[in-house]
Amino acid sequence: MKIVIISQCTPREKIVVHEIVKNFDYVTLVNSEQSKGVLTNKESKSVIAKKTKSRSFYDKNGLRFFHKFHKIAIQKRTHHFNLENHDFTKVSIPFTEINTKRGLAFIKSLNPDILFTCNAPILKGEILNIPKIAAINVHYGMPPHYRGNDTLFWAYIKKDFENLGGCLHYTTKGVDRGNILAEVFPSLDPKDSLVEVDIKTSKLLAKAAVKILKDIENCGQIPTGKEQVEKGRNYKLHEKTLKHHLTYLAQMNLGLLKPKPRKEMMVFYTK
């Protein structure tokens, strides 16, 4: 079974990617980087400009600092997940090139059975129709309640700890609207920060991904999954501001954000 993974492969997503390349023989990682790659397109900058909402100077730079700090904190805890220890093919494509005609042709040339996305751009329908078996996405959040961007953050800061987790779902045209194949709920401790929650969720998503892919490979059947009946909420990238991050830090330091203890749990909808 040929698996093509599209991912920016940040430290958090690398945990999931690592388990897939470790457990399957025919894997190609399409690293959707922001600037360099094998394809070019003059329209890339204009595409970004149209899709990016205007932010204040403080929001842009403040959020950049917090994202970098969060990324480094996860990287320090997950440096042992080394992709280079495994045999797989790796290619690079700029983030904004994947949905172009050349990007479409490139993904087609990889001839995937499974197209697996993990922190990737929203894919056009033409690309979603390429895989022979299915297109599957990893989402750090619990749809339909939390679709879109930074959904672990929103659930955490709203103290909606029951919906703090992630899922694997079929990739469709809607944002995180496809049928759900698995839901994962990380163990929680009152002292857990977003960094701990991110890492715990990633490890469970990695286990769930391997199980689902193995089931499809061994059984030769495509599970239906759980349909999302409600529309829920789609959180946009521009909605999170510097104020939200500062609020999170203040509440953490004051001990106002304390998840209720629970054990980890995985729920599958693959029968």
Image: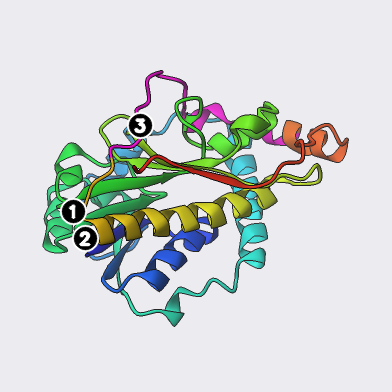
Residue 242 in view, yes or no: no
Q: From the viewer's perspective, tell me whether residue 269 is left or right of residue 221.
A: right
Q: Where is residue 50 in the image (x, y as percent from the top left)?
A: 32, 32
Going from the N terminus, do you reach mark 2 or mark 3 first? 2
Describe the element under mark 2 as helix, strand or loop.
loop
Q: Quadrant of the N terminus?
A: bottom left
Q: What residue type is labelled 3?
A: Val
Q: Where is residue 132 in the image (x, y as percent from the top left)?
A: 14, 52
Q: Quadrant of the C terminus?
A: top left
Residue lying at 19% horizontally and 51% vertically, measured from the top left = 133
Residue that badge 1 annotates? 103
Residue that badge 3 annotates? 175
Residue lying at 61% horizontally and 64% vertically, measured from the top left = 75
Residue that badge 2 annotates? 39
The one of 36 and 195 positioned closer to us in this rendering = 195
Asked whether the beta carbons under mark 2 and mark 1 sit within 8 Å of each other, the answer is: yes
Q: Distance between the residues labelled 2 and 3?
A: 25 Å
Dot 2 alpha-carbon crowd within 10 angstroms: few under 14, some 14 to 19, many 20 or more = some
Going from the N terminus, do you reach mark 2 or mark 1 first? 2
Q: How far apart are marks 2 and 1 (CA)?
A: 8 Å
Q: Which one is closest to the eye, mark 2 or mark 3? A: 3
